[in-house]
Image (cartoon, coloured by chain):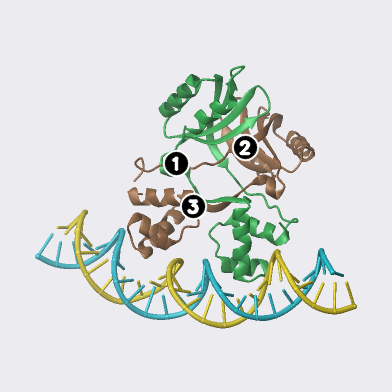
Chain colours: A brown, B green, C yellow, D cyan
Amino acid sequence: MDAIDLALVDLLRGNARLSYAELARQVGLSAPAVHERVGKLEAGGVIRAYRAEVEPETIGLAVTALISVVEDSGADTDDVLEAVRAMPEIESCYFMAGVESFLLKARVSTIAELEQLIVRLNRTPGVASTRTSIALSTKWENRPQPVGPSSS
Amino acid sequence: MDAIDLALVDLLRGNARLSYAELARQVGLSAPAVHERVGKLEAGGVIRAYRAEVEPETIGLAVTALISVVEDSGADTDDVLEAVRAMPEIESCYFMAGVESFLLKARVSTIAELEQLIVRLNRTPGVASTRTSIALSTKWENRPQPVGPSSS
DNA sequence: AGGGCGAGGTCGATGGCGTCCACGGACTGT
DNA sequence: ACAGTCCGTGGACGCCATCGACCTCGCCCT
């Protein structure tokens, strides 16, 4: 994990579809060298996936909500996690410090679907209560912060 | 935006580095046809970007925090947004319903940096108060939910 | 009803890219 | 000093991206 690896990661966080040849030009190596480095970054768990970032409204996911979950005392956290993981609407799940064990980010089509989701969550064994906040708009999301030695 | 476009979006949300040839095979069109469709999806703002998803710890971003921001009464929301946008540590920014106008997701290297970030936020004109919760772990993030007509 | 038109597809060609392989130089430990 | 290892380069070859020409279908206008 040297400076070149960091540069590659930065480039790919900015545009995951850059060709190996282009990456090679940017970091000053040959294409096969870059290919091998990126392969190792993937295998080593540094690069987890490549994803297209989509405007959610355009695919019918107009409602974004953030839901805090308080667990029952004595609930099995893993079981709750498992149940939450089975709900595809939950795009992100953070295990938090504080009374509210989880914070979930959910995306659904309509408020009615959000209501159903909340009901399902509250029915989940181990869940004591939930608190939902609706996002009126997403200003930005997953903006990659540069990580290299300033720029290069 | 028909069923094939949705399928392409789904495929690219799952793996942004699929070749046009592979996409073409999956949706049953020719490569040039897919190329044109994806180009239109990008131009039309459906596909916003392609990003490599990186394990944050491996690039030195070990601390994840969620910060709620309450605005001053009479603050200019756009100015506050502008100031927040200038802080690269803020990866996501949602404009929320409720007293806390914004919810920010921040990633920093150390707790000390988080402290500095919070101080900077509280000093920002228009910001009345902030409330920070630290994520102990990220269970998952930005999991794409399938959007097609069930599966296909 | 018939003809023109536009959107969106296939096919074929070509240049660049991905990817495999053999080779070479620097650094390490003995 | 020497051998082994790591990491790179360069060349080769097949696949892919991408352009242009053409085709087909549905729609609209007359």
Query: Residue sitting at 53 percent across and 37 percent down?
Result: B137
Left or right of residue A84: residue A25: left
Q: Position of residue B122 (x, y in %)?
A: 50, 20
Q: Amino acid at mark 1?
A: Glu
Q: Chain of mark 2?
A: A
On the rendered structure, is C17 left or right of B95?
left
The structure residue drawn at horizontal position 59% and vertical position 59%, both measured from the top left corner, is B39
State yes or no: discs 1 and 2 in contact (Cβ < 8 Å). Answer: no
The answer for how far apart the CA atoms under marks 3 and 2 are is: 21 Å
Element marked by disc 1: helix
Tell me the mark number nearer the camera, choosing from 1 and 2: 2
* Mark sitting on residue A42: none
Is the same chain shared between marks 1 and 3? no
Q: Would you name the residue on which mark 1 appears?
A: B57
Of residue A58 and residue A96, the one placed in the foreground of this image is A58
Distance CA(mark 1)–CA(mark 2)? 25 Å
Q: Which mark is residue A138?
A: 2
| Chain under disc 3 | A
Q: Quadrant where the N terminus of chain B lies?
A: bottom right
Quadrant in which residue B2 is drawn: bottom right
- Classify mark 3: residues with Cα within 10 Å, few (<14), some (14-19) or many (20+): some
Report the amino acid beneath label 2. Thr
The nearer-to-camera label among 1 and 3 is 3
Q: Which residue is mark 3?
A: A15
| Same chain assignment for discs 1 and 2 | no
Classify A57 as above or below B80. below
For the point 57% across and 69% down, the residue is: B21
Quick check: A10 above or below A131? Answer: below
The amino acid type of the residue labelled 3 equals: Asn
Q: Residue B32: horizontal and vertical position, in percent?
A: 60, 69
Mark nearer the N terminus (3 vs 2):
3
